[in-house]
Amino acid sequence: MDRSLRNVLVVSFGFLLLFTAYGGLQSLQSSLYSEEGLGVTALSTLYGGMLLSSMFLPPLLIERLGCKGTIILSMCGYVAFSVGNFFASWYTLIPTSILLGLGAAPLWSAQSTYLTIMGNTHAKKAGKHGKDVVNQYFGIFFLIFQSSGVWGNLISSLVFGQTPSQEALPEEQLMSCGASDCLMATATTNSTQRPSQQLVYTLLGIYTGSGVLAVLMIAAFLKPIRDVQRESEGEKKSPPFWSTLLSTFKLYRDKRLCLLILLPLYSGLQQGFLSSEYTRSYVTCALGIQFVGYVMICFSATNALCSVLYGKVSQYTGRVVLYVLGTVTHLSCMIALLLWRPGADQLAVFFVFSGLWGMADAVWQTQNNALYGVLFEKSKEAAFANYRLWEALGYVIAFGYSTFLCVRVKLYILLGVLSLTMVAYGVVECVESKNPIRPHAAGQANQAEDEEIQTKM
């Protein structure tokens, strides 16, 4: 097996194990800890910590520890969050959420940087286009990574499936589900009752073990990698501390990045909506918490399959076509969710919505990362740190207003942000079409060319 592909697979399966645990926990937080909004507050705090760490930590940790060391250290924060859920309270979930949040941005920045360097290095050796190989590697990663939602939610569904079934809800209680939910659903329905503590401990034990295995896999099998582009440029000395620390903000001098910040912001908003509002106000409200896992399995499976498909298709269609597909799909889902009144007799519809949402989310996950890697190849760490910063802000906003806005209002917000996002993205594509950058520019495109593109904008 090719060495580059082997390392991509190690990273992918390490994230699979880690997010089998975290993905399942995130989907259940709003339903499992609904008292006084503890679940969504923990998630909001988590992504708040991720937002802060995105400003400073990723370039600094990657420069000092390398991609492998950063991934291992950051993964430990996820394991701590799983342990904190054993003693769920404001004094355990909030601190461990902050710890996870601080590690999340460096984790994802290191992963994106690692795959981008690996893809460009392999492309240079094989004489291929850098962006095509990077797209392919991100497609493989997200195929494996997104399947973590299948396993994580399957585990939670099988464990919580032992909970006694709930009686069908009366029509007047179903009226408060879906877009009409104004924080009344979790207070009025019997279907949101918490599973027994023994079942919760069983689930948390499985999740914690999965996270520990992820750390051990990365430590044992992932090969360290250096940015060959920097080595070829003769960069022997590490940049000063403050230069590395502030590199995240310096990148805003590139107007392309300023226009693209809405892409990760919307990505965080729509994922936050799915994991909090859809699971609580639609699935848990109408069907019960035991169905959350099964519905999210459909989302994850569709997301995983579409991720690898888009990685291949983008070579022929280009990224613009995929962005249009994702936009149309999400707009259609939001309008339908505004009009739909969920009920227990419409079981298939819950899966249709989660599947379509996953199909669109796969566009944002694969193409956003590949887009940042291609456009900001010379400043990958800072670019991906910015990406995670704005995605984290999207999560913070989504979970932050979760406890005091009606679901209908949240859907309107998503519609508006998505529309603005696509307008800004379209401007960037127009500029790029007039100032094309060669796909594999590691040793060809110089700083003067980059500055010329920014000046023309």
Image (cartoon, rainbow, N blue to C red):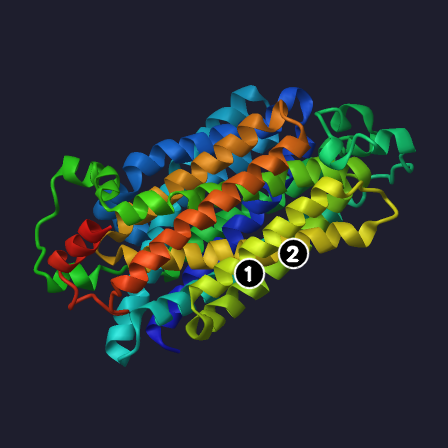
Q: Residue at x 22, y 45 (%)?
A: 64
Give how far apart the Cα atoms at labels 1 and 2 are: 11 Å
Question: At label 1, which amino acid type do we have?
Answer: Leu
Image coordinates of residue 88 in percent, x first then y, are: 60, 27
* Residue 120 quadrant: bottom left
* Residue 51 quadrant: top left
Residue occupied by mark 2: 356
Mark 1 touches mark 2? (CB < 8 Å): no
Vertical order, 152 against 176 (above or below): below
Q: Residue at x 29, y 38 (%)?
A: 57
Vertical order, 172 against 17 (above or below): above
Element type at mark 2: helix
Vertical order, 124 against 45 (above or below): below
Question: At label 2, which amino acid type do we have?
Answer: Leu
Q: Is residue 344 left or right of residue 5?
A: right
Vertical order, 440 against 401 (above or below): below
Q: Residue at x 34, y 53 (%)?
A: 428
Q: Nearer the viewer, residue 65 or 198?
A: 65
Report the number of numbered marks. Answer: 2
Q: Nearer the viewer, residue 406 or 141?
A: 406
Tell me which numbered mark, 1 or 2, is placed earlier along the sequence.
Answer: 1
Query: In the picture, which quadrant includes the N terminus?
Result: bottom left
Residue occupied by mark 1: 325
Image coordinates of residue 91 in percent, x first then y, are: 53, 20
